[in-house]
Image (cartoon, rainbow, N blue to C red):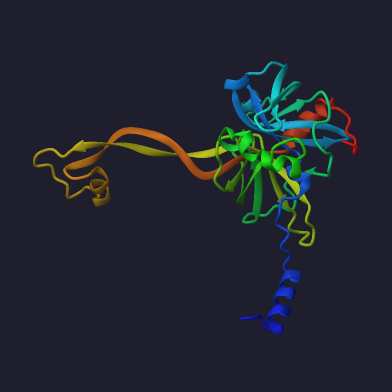
């Protein structure tokens, strides 16, 4: 059935009154890079660039570069299954904040405007936020099909969305950004970005923080074990018996394993800005990159 004119006008009105600008814009995803630390057998994760006072800096999670010296080398993923080694100067946060600033030898990405917000202005609990990265040590070959179209010579990061749950602050500890979203290994070091809800008609994204990991949830470990003669099963949950199979029970081993709770942890970008103000040594950026 074809829509009536009333339906068409109503949809047009909704699209004007309630903007649907939710797509991650070029100024975000063209700054996100896959990095590898420790060579072919090393760990892979995510980093992104920020410009401060006309200079470029590479931001990542501190635990990604924990084994690096002050001046060392990392690898950046480029075209399918290729990595480029670059020397960097490493400035990790001295506190428990999981952020490190890397000084690259040259400009690495476009300098499209992407503003870090140090005071969470315009961020409200319950709003959608996005985080970008390269999970599971993602094969560059699998995503390089996007490289020539969207992110220059670099592979395209995977984009995820979560709900901003708030920023948790504990006495004598740095604040932690919490998102209701599922984080996978490899997103560490990626940006958390959001739109300022005070400006509903603006499509610009801002950087709120850096992905650190996820909040673990301890889950008991069970093992399948035969039922003992005369064992009372009246207090055993029926699902546990069904999972174990006929004549068996799932017994609690007394051990626990950390599982992903579905809550993403991040560190406020303010700490990266503080490091940059102490070490303003990034390479100059140019729009002709």
Q: Position of residue 286 (x, y in %)?
A: 90, 35
Taking depth in this image into account, of 282 and 166 the one nearest to the observer is: 282
Q: Residue furthest left?
A: 230
In percent of the image, x 40 and y 34: which residue is there? 257
Taking 289 as reference, is 4 above or below it? Answer: below
Q: Percent position (x, y) of residue 152? A: 77, 39
| Quadrant of the rendered image containing residue 109 | top right
Q: Nearer the viewer, residue 231 or 31?
A: 31
- The picture places residue 70, in percent across and down from the top left corner, at 72, 17
- Residue 78: image quadrant is top right
Q: Nearer the viewer, residue 170 or 250?
A: 250
Total count of labels: 0
| Direction from residue 201 to residue 234 in the image, left or right | left
Residue 191 in view here: no
Instruction: Report the side of 155 relative to 136 (left or right).
Output: right
- Report the quarter where the C terminus lies: top right
Q: Residue at x 59, y 40 (%)?
A: 265
Residue in the picture at 68% in, 27% down = 82
Q: Position of residue 30 (x, y in %)?
A: 76, 41
Q: Where on the picture, by quarter, is residue 84?
A: top right
């Amino acid at each position: 059935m074809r829509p009536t004119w009333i339906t068409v006008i109503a949809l047009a009105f909704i699209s004007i009154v309630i903007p649907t600008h939710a797509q991650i814009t070029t100024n975000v995803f063209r700054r996100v890079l896959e990095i590898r630390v420790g060579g072919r057998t090393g760990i892979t994760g995510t980093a992104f660039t920020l410009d401060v006072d006309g200079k470029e800096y590479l931001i990542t999670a501190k635990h990604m570069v924990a084994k690096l010296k002050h001046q060392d080398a990392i690898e950046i993923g480029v075209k399918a299954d290729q990595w480029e080694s670059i020397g960097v100067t490493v400035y990790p946060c001295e506190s428990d904040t999981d952020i490190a600033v890397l000084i690259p030898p040259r400009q690495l990405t476009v300098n499209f405007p992407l503003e870090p917000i140090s005071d969470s202005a315009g961020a409200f609990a319950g709003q959608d936020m996005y985080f970008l990265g390269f999970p599971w040590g993602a094969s560059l070959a699998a995503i390089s099909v996007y490289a020539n179209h969207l992110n220059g010579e670099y592979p395209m990061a995977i984009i995820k969305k979560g709900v901003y749950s708030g920023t948790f602050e504990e006495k004598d500890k740095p604040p932690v950004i919490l998102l209701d979203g599922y984080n996978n290994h490899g997103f560490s070091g990626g940006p958390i970005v959001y739109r300022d809800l005070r400006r509903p008609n603006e499509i610009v994204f801002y950087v709120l923080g850096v992905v650190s990991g996820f909040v673990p949830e301890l889950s008991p470990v069970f093992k399948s074990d035969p039922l003992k003669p005369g064992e009372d099963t009246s207090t055993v949950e029926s699902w546990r018996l069904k999972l174990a199979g006929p004549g068996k029970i799932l017994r609690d081993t007394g051990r626990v394993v950390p599982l992903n709770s579905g809550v993403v942890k991040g560190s406020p970008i303010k700490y990266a800005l503080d490091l940059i103000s102490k070490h303003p040594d990034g390479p100059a950026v140019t729009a002709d990159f």
